[in-house]
Amino acid sequence: SRGKEDMVQALVLEEAGRLALRDIDLPQDVGPDEVRIAIDTVGVCGSDVHYYTHGKIGPFVVKDPMVLGHEAAGTVVETGRDVAHLNVGDRVCMEPGIPNGASKASKLGVYNVDPDVRFWATPPVHGCLTASVVHPAAFTYPIPDHVSFAEGAMVEPFAIGMQAAAKARIKPGDVGFVTGAGPIGIMVALAALAGGCAKVYIADLVEDKLALAAGYDNIEPILLPRDNPQQVLHDATEGWGADVVFECAGAAASIQTALDVVAPAGCVVWVGMPVDPVPVDIVLAQSKEIRMETVFRYANMYDRAIALLASGKVDLKTLISETYPFSDSITAFDRAVEARPTDVKIQIKLT
């Protein structure tokens, strides 16, 4: 039987609009292939905020109290008997989506699209904004000593950028274009540069967001509607267009812009998720014979993302806008709901 040792403090979404910092009964028994991790830092994601404000995302509805959070780093405090690559005391970050290892998707290496995947803080699965979690060792990754827990908690959203850059099949020297300078848009731009783009242009309606993105070398801001992305890319590429385009805003206007700006035989990667279906100019895409790719989370990207952070080629530290103690978790979420134009990533520190 489960005892009091399974009661842990967590940030619990009781229902839409109501958070509580309280004890909740979560399994803490460690299986042979699992580890228990003391959580240090958790990032607040847009999906966490959406569950808080709306109580659902598409078909995923919060029907029972649910622990939030899926961007995390911490320290291994217990290992299962069959775990060989991790030890107590290791600093780690965790991939939040656990597929069914027997599924066809897993066997094909595309486990992110496994219908049976269990993803932290996606109803009814509890997240990681809690003192400790039990997690499969196979989806727990060591981080080097010089990579902070805060950076480790940024690996999850950066892995989406890595997935997008990999899908684009960037060639060295390509010119990139990103729509939307939110957290994912900026991370996609950084991943595209790391993947070989010579320069990445990024468009947004908010000047403060663009200013942060433009602080990085070789990221060029395009302020909408003052600047015309098609004209900017036309002038920058002698009329050719962007070799790779990443649509990260999920808005009808930016989806059209992506197709306008992409070069003939170029690639558009759809990263942003529109709330409702949007029109797509298929004939324009056909006339350029472009390639289109889609992104849903990531697969086999965590080790690569950690390697890039460790190398110093990608610096995500400047994207951390504010860090709150665990006791102020609700304040942190309310700050995230504000969506201040200068905010990129809000984090919560548990230790």
Image (cartoon, rainbow, N blue to C red):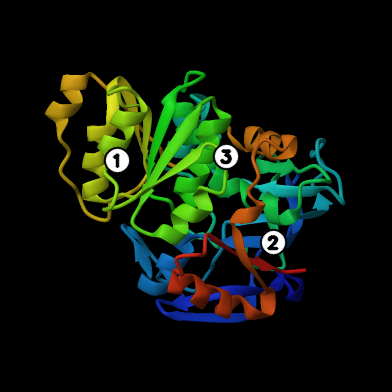
Q: What residue would you read off at disc 1?
A: 229
Q: Examine the rendering and report whether any part of residue 114 can be seen.
A: no
Disc 3 versus disc 1: distance between alpha carbons? 19 Å
Name which residue type carries label 3. Asp
* Mark sitting earlier along the chain (2/3): 2
Badge 3 density bin: few <14, some 14–19, many ≥20, Cα 10 Å: few
Q: How far across and how far down the image is residue 167, in percent?
A: 44, 28
The extreme left residue here reads: 283
Name which residue type carries label 1. Pro
* Mark sitting earlier along the chain (3/1): 3
Find residue 217 and name its label.
3
Q: What residue would you read off at disc 2?
A: 41
Q: How far across and how far down the image is residue 279, in percent?
A: 15, 43
Mark 3 secondary-structure assignment: loop
Name which residue type carries label 2. Thr
Residue lying at 74% horizontally and 38% vertically, measured from the top left: 310
Compared with 80, 123 (above or below) is below
Asked if marks 3 and 1 touch (Cβ < 8 Å), the reply is no
Q: How far across and how far down the image is residue 21, in percent?
A: 61, 80
Looking at the picture, tell me which residue is in the foreground, 200 or 231. Answer: 231
Residue lying at 32% horizontally and 57% vertically, measured from the top left: 59
Disc 1 versus disc 2: distance between alpha carbons? 37 Å
